[in-house]
Amino acid sequence: MNWLRKHADGLKLAGKILLGLYVAACAFLYFDQQHLEYKPVASSDQPGDFGLPDFKRLTLKTPDGQTLIAWYKKAAPMHPTILYLHGNEGNLGEFSKRYKLLDAQGDGVLAVDYRGFGASTGAPDEKGLIIDGQAAYEALIAREIGLNHIIIYGHSLGTGVAVALAARHKVAALVLEAPFSSAVDVGAYRYPEFPVRDLMRDQFRSDLRIVKVKCPILIMHGTADQTVPYQFGKRLFDLAPQPKDMFTFPGGQHDLLPEPGVAPKLEAWLSAHVPLSAADPTGTGSSLDPNQEE
């Protein structure tokens, strides 16, 4: 007791310093969260720079005035077109191997750089990324690709955009690679010492949106994923409505599609759940102007 009395003022000061440091750390997380959640890389690359000579570089306009860059390859006959939504880092070129794998299966691909990524204008946030996904979806409709031929494919953060789109629109199927129940769940897991649920703005609540999806759902997740732990993909799967399937890859990490055998397994699932016919009813129209090819 004597020691406590003797050092009371020092302990109070130390407590105030620690509290101040904690508040400062919370403030840093709050005000810098966009940089923590989104890590775009600027680029003006062309598809041909990455061995994709048959892909076209498109310019898409969003309703809120942004200009997006997308890469597009038409599907082979009797194959779907995949609207590909990448994760929170990099740009289109960094995922070129994925487009090659999908193209090798005969599938069409439309991959878009969100606002602030690559050569797309603007700055990313949840509302904006969903608008960007909508613009890409409408670009496919404008090209008269039937709704029963459109697959929405999201990877990592892109799964949050993919679920939001599929919850609003009719598509043939939804494929989610390394998804989360919500981005805020992952944030709270990574920073348990902070009130992340109160601080985080862009929460990507896929857990609330997935119940509105009305197409077949496939979730692919690796048990060794260090970026989005497996438990969050499994949680989303449990919440998803039928019909649904989950491919669990023991020892699999965050980037599954490039791994041997994954693309053929995905294609087999698509063939079983998205039967295509020669009769291809087109979309219902779009408010988006036709794409401009550069």
Image (spheres, helix red, strand yellow):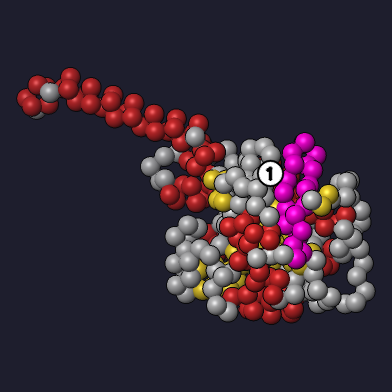
Q: Can residue 252 be seen?
A: yes
| Segment tinted magenta in the rendering | 54-73
Q: Can residue 167 be seen?
A: no
| In front of the other: 195 or 155 | 155
Q: Residue at x 44, y 30 (%)?
A: 27
- Residue found at the very far top of the displayed protein: 9
From the top left corner, tell me how far across and down residue 147 is, in percent. Answer: 84, 63
Residue 69 colored in magenta in the image? yes
121 horizontally vs 8: left or right: right
From the top left corner, tell me how far across and down residue 222 is, in percent. Answer: 50, 68
Residue 46 colored in magenta in the image? no
Choose top left, top right, bottom left or bottom right for residue 123.
top right
- Residue found at the very far left of the displayed protein: 2
Magenta span main SS: strand
Whether residue 19 is situated above or below residue 187 in the rendered picture: above
From the top left corner, tell me how far across and down residue 188 is, in percent. Answer: 46, 47
- Identify the residue position indicated by label 1 in the image: 120
Whether residue 108 is situated above or below residue 117 in the rendered picture: below
Whether residue 108 is situated above or below residue 23 in the rendered picture: below
Q: Residue at x 93, y 74 (%)?
A: 279
Whether residue 79 is situated above or below residue 204 in the rendered picture: below
Label 1 crowd (10 A; few <14 / some 14-19 / many >=20): many
Choose top left, top right, bottom left or bottom right for residue 148.
bottom right
Q: Residue at x 28, y 24 (%)?
A: 16
Determine whether the residue tagged by mark 1 lies in a helix, strand or loop: loop
| In front of the other: 216 or 2 | 216
27 horizontally vs 87: left or right: left
**Given the image, on which type of amino acid does mark 1 rest?**
Ser
From the top left corner, tell me how far across and down residue 98 is, in percent. Answer: 62, 66
Choose top left, top right, bottom left or bottom right for residue 283.
bottom right
Quadrant of the image containing the N terminus: top left
Q: Residue at x 84, y 50 (%)?
A: 291
